[in-house]
Amino acid sequence: MNKQYLFRYIVILFLSLGTAAAFHSCDFIFTPAVGNDETLDGPIEGLTNEQLRMFFQGDEQFNKVFSFNEGLGPIFNNTACGSCHVADGKSHPNANLKRFQKNLGGGNYDPLREFGGLQLQNRSIPNYPAETIPPVANAVSERSGPIVAGLGLVEAIPDTSILAYADPNDLNGDGISGKPQLVNSPDYLNYPPGPYGGKYLGRFGRKAGAIVLLQQTVEAYHQDMGITTDLIPLENYNPLAGGYIDPVADPEVPGNILHVVVFYLKTLKPPVTRMQNDPGVIAGRTRFNDIGCNKCHVNSMQTGFSPINALSYKQVNLYSDMLLHDMGQELSDNFIEGEAGEMEWRTTPLWGLGIIQNATGGTPYYMHDGRTSDLVEAIRLHGGEAEAIKQLFMNLPEADKQNIIAFLKSL
Ligand SMILES: [Ca+2]
Ligand SMILES: [Ca+2]
Ligand SMILES: [Ca+2]
Ligand SMILES: [Ca+2]
């Protein structure tokens, strides 16, 4: 389960055998997080023993593969959280999920609930039909699972810090109009009316539709795996096939398991940077900020108070403003989600970018649906609000472009 600890142990063993000289770089040995920087898995520093115990329980549950006898389905997309967030990283595009709706124009849509909208569950248990996308759907949003590391820190960033970057009407005239996703809290969270006209600031998901990690987790169990929890105890079934009684009493996952999985997400360490002393990386960072990539990919924010000490008042180098941006026609999914229109996406945090290929067979996949494995192409796909800054990138001398790429891969 934990390569990095084994690795540390081996390093210590080597040191005590006096063979340290066998390593060609001292850096390699004395970096505090040796081995830690090649994997997204692992706890954030500063957890108590009790918290570490919960973390490891959560890790196990996150990777637990559900079977029919344990409540999987009747309809589902995949059998474990870890099947889509492989090693806590991004999913392979063949594990993408799809949401559909009928976009009626002018910001209106029909969620097509009678056909199982909004999420397509394309798999099912034996003798029960999976869903298909009905022909009336004119919007299909295909999404790959994002990196889940570091999200406890992201959750602990105060709303005000994120909203400080919002400029929905571009009043400062820089062409960037970050917009907050504002959503109603689902009944099962039992929240009071939110601070923004009754709504809350959404942060999680590709269009930032979920407010907190608990919500994201409950919905993932229910929608992605067909697993009921005490927050959503009713099965998700295919409306065209009718209700379904399975052999497993609901909730299929008890509250304490839900709790450790959420705790695990909260306390997964943020991705660890690499090659920070490389001259190309240093130059790339400067260029990245000079040409304005950081207007959306805000380098860092600060957490506020958290009941989990390790998350309190920490710098978070997430490279995102956590806001929605119009990214142009080429990235449109024609799909509306809350405040997010067809062309709008939440700025993807860029941390972990350099190691995501470790979990997907050596090939990385970028953008919301994993459509490209090439970072330059990922940047070229930026349109809309990012068009002008993308052009600045495209017009850079080749060496500067390569430095920016090296910088991205160091995150
Ligand atoms: Ca079930
Ligand atoms: Ca469905
Ligand atoms: Ca602006
Ligand atoms: Ca059940």
Image (cartoon, helix red, strand yellow):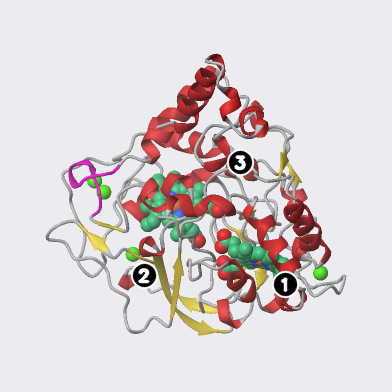
Question: How far across and down, in percent of the image, does residue 183 sit?
Answer: 59, 59
Of the image marks 1 and 2, the number of the one nearer the N terminus: 2
Question: How far across and down, in percent of the image, does residue 74 sit?
Answer: 23, 55
* Main SS of residues in magenta: loop
10 Å crowding of disc 2: few (<14), some (14-19), many (20+): few
Of the image marks 3 and 1, the number of the one nearer the N terminus: 3
| Farthest top residue in view | 16
Q: Distance between the residues labelled 3 and 2?
A: 37 Å
Question: How far across and down, in percent of the image, does residue 120 sit?
Answer: 34, 67
Is there any visible trace of residue 113 in the rendered image? Answer: yes
Q: Which of 370 and 324 is in front in this view?
A: 370
Q: Is residue 405 left or right of residue 53?
A: right
Label disc, if present, on residue 398 of the rendered structure = 1
Q: Nearer the viewer, residue 236 or 126?
A: 126
Q: How far apart are marks 1 and 2 (CA)?
A: 50 Å
Q: How far apart are marks 3 and 1 (CA)?
A: 31 Å
Q: What residue type is labelled 2?
A: Arg
Secondary structure of the residue carrying numbered label 1? helix
Asked if disc 2 is less than 8 Å from ligand 2, the answer is: no
Q: Considering only vertical position in the picture, is 394 above or below 161?
A: below
Q: What residue type is labelled 1?
A: Glu
* Segment tinted magenta in the rendering: 65-73
Q: Considering only vertical position in the picture, is 76 above or below 275?
A: below
Picture quadrant of residue 302: top right
In the image, residue 409 lies in the stretch drawn in magenta:
no
Nearest to the eye among marks 3 and 1: give it. Answer: 1
Secondary structure of the residue carrying numbered label 2? helix
Q: Is residue 101 left or right of residue 43?
A: left
Q: Mark 2 points at which residue?
A: 113
Q: Mark 3 points at which residue?
A: 270
Q: Locate the N terminus and report the quarter of the image it occupies.
A: top left
Q: What residue type is labelled 3?
A: Pro
